[in-house]
Amino acid sequence: MEMEIEAEEEQAPMEPPKIHRLDDSVVNRIAAGEVIQRPVSAVKELVENSLDACSSSINVVVKDGGLKLIQVSDDGHGIRYEDLPILCERHTTSKLSTFEDLQSIKSMGFRGEALASMTYVAHVTVTTITKGQLHGYRVSYKDGVMEHEPKACATVKGTQIMVENLFYNMTARRKTLQNSADDYSKIVDVLSRFAIHHMNVSFSCRKHGAARADVNSVATISRIDAIRSVYGVSVARCLMKVEALDKDPSSSVFQMEGFISNSNYVAKKITMVLFINDRLVDCTALKRALEIVYAATLPKASKPFIYMAIILPPEHVDVNVHPTKREVSLLNQEIIIEKIQSVVESRLRSSNETQTFQEQAVKPTPSCQMVSSNDSNRNPSPSGSKLQKVPVHKMVRTDSSDPAGRLHVYLQPESCGHLERNTSLTAIRSSVRQRRNPKETADLTSLQELIDEIDRNCHSGLLDIVRHCTYIGMADDVFALLQHDTHLYLANVVNLSKELMYQQVLRRFAHFNAIQISEPAPVKELIVLALKEGNLDPECSENVELNEKIAEMNMELLKQKADMIEEYFCIHIDKDGNLSRLPVILDQYTPDMDRVPEFVLCLGNDVDWEEEKKCLQVISAALGNFYAMHPPMLPNPSGDGLQFYQKRKPFRNPEERLSCSTGMSVCSWISTSLFKES
């Protein structure tokens, strides 16, 4: 009986668990883990926000695969000051107001969840400035709210968002994302896809502390040029254009254009870049349909490269079907896929008749010509009685170091004139300059002469050293150690940075972004301050009166030249003689503002305003001196390095700028692009 009672008690139903309401912080953190699945999700959301802000330049910096740092900077319209308190709250957005707006949404963001989600799993800092503001604002967020009131700060146009210590409070998620190389490669892949679609926007992506960007695209009007700059020439030359159009309301309404690879493209996996209404999305059904077409038509090239941009009426696309907006739902999706599949198949069949093989011509060296000549002398004449036996090592390429065994001995020399090669090189350099500066270059002969002088005097040996050197560290307070091959070099950091900034000014001429000074500085007071620093007896009444007169004259001169220096160098001096804007010479770099008085004195006192070339050269040199990296780099200077801590007088003539270098002084001839690549 007791056993039966115990059995009945075991079979008795358990009490159902009580349902309770989760705390808001728990709800938000769970939602954040769904929206921000890994670092690449955060980068994609931030880049899409920058694109919605009408940016023309987007720069991404990543550290430890995005777990330590994700920094996205753009030059868009910025965020209004009054919107900062609710910026990172959930479901706050400027993209829509009613649910009906979702049916015709054109922006990439619409839920208002991304930034809020980041604040629940990371530390977020926003720096922004809008048009017309004298200064920007910086504010940090945690759990959707501001940690402090917005602080005024100097910043460049647009918005910068820093996401630090991602998933710091999600131990399990962070442990699964320890492969930083894998996460960084995913970020590079996403930025590459955005870069080839949004051709009017410049993109860059680099690791924190790296000198060279892994994605570096410039605005262009050609889609194939955009693909070439991101994915390389080997991919671009294997692509062919494909287009499809349907305007039948009874079946489907869409427009598709893109590029697909031909039979010459061979890869280990498929690369498909798909944008639907300018959204980067995945479509498994379309991808599978195109794979089937390639497998049936080009079996040896069954892993293609595909770029497609599909445009549909907004009301035919449901964008709200995936937490990260990676997928969308299309009206009449099967019909659209079938028609695109048919167009691609037709295009592939028409291009499958021929296959192109790339051949590289090898120019002969003197040693090759000598070997060929010796071989011809050894060969017997037709009238000879007996043919000599050819040595085995002459028949087969056995040793790459032996001239007789080199492959190019067997190739025909390329006949190409020196003039033709020079013309081609000039055209390439011109093309590179145009891509580096998307806007039209200022049409000034003197400016071009200054740039030509830099290019003409480029030292080929030092060019190779700077391009391929490895930075070791600072040898003392001024000189840096660089290693190239087995040699160590001392480089004067001060002079190298002066030359870098000087060349940057010339190459960005008339196309600068601006640093807005929060409180405009009176030019007269700046000049007086600079003059006092150079006086041995600053308290002398005669010196004070003289300084006042000099400052007054220079201020009036700069007010007269204000229009010119603002148009060409983005230096704004208002009618009251106040300095309110300075140019951005190097992105993400702010100069030492303690040197503003010295710079303004140089503008007013040292510039020859009558001769155009000298005028531009001295102003550019003054900007280079102002923006350069000046000591002290360490607190208590001593020894021979002490002389470099003393402030120098501004350049009195252009020759002083060219003779100021010591150590690796010839490096000053190397063009700006090399410093970017080193």
Image: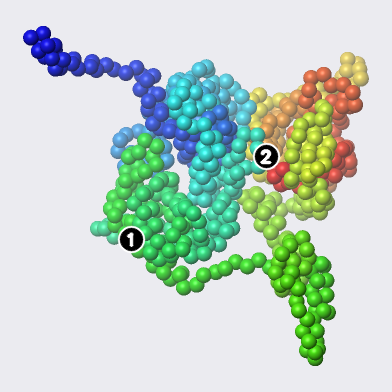
Q: Nearer the viewer, residue 560 or 218?
A: 218
Q: Which mark is residue 339?
A: 1
- For the residue carrying disc 2, how many other residues have a C-alpha within 10 Å: few (<14), some (14-19), or many (20+)? few
Q: Position of residue 664 (x, y in %)?
A: 85, 40
Tell me the distance, in whole angstroms, between the alpha carbons under discs 1 and 2: 46 Å
In this picture, residue 177 sits left or right of residue 337: right
Residue shown at the point (35%, 57%) measured from the top left: 289
The amino acid sitting under disc 1 is Lys
Name which quarter of the figure residue 385 lies in.
bottom right
> Nearer the observer, disc 1 or disc 2?
2
- For the residue carrying disc 1, how many other residues have a C-alpha within 10 Å: few (<14), some (14-19), or many (20+)? some
Q: Position of residue 109 (x, y in %)?
A: 41, 37
The amino acid sitting under disc 2 is Ala
Residue shown at the point (45%, 51%) measured from the top left: 273
Determine the residue located farthest toward the bottom in the rendered image: 383
Quadrant where the C terminus lies? Answer: top right
Label 2: element kind: loop
Quadrant where the N terminus lies? Answer: top left
Label 1: element kind: helix
Name which quarter of the figure residue 153 lies in.
top right
Mark yes or no: residue 672 visible. Answer: no
Q: Nearer the viewer, residue 134 or 294?
A: 294
Residue shown at the point (81%, 47%) measured from the top left: 462
The residue singled out by tag 2 in the image is 211
Mark yes or no: residue 500 visible. Answer: yes
In this picture, residue 100 sits left or right of residue 304: left
Q: Position of residue 486 (x, y in %)?
A: 81, 43
Q: Which mark is residue 42?
A: none
The first of marks 1 and 2 along the sequence is: 2
Q: Are marks 1 and 2 in contact (CB under 8 Å)?
A: no
Q: Position of residue 260 (x, y in %)?
A: 46, 60
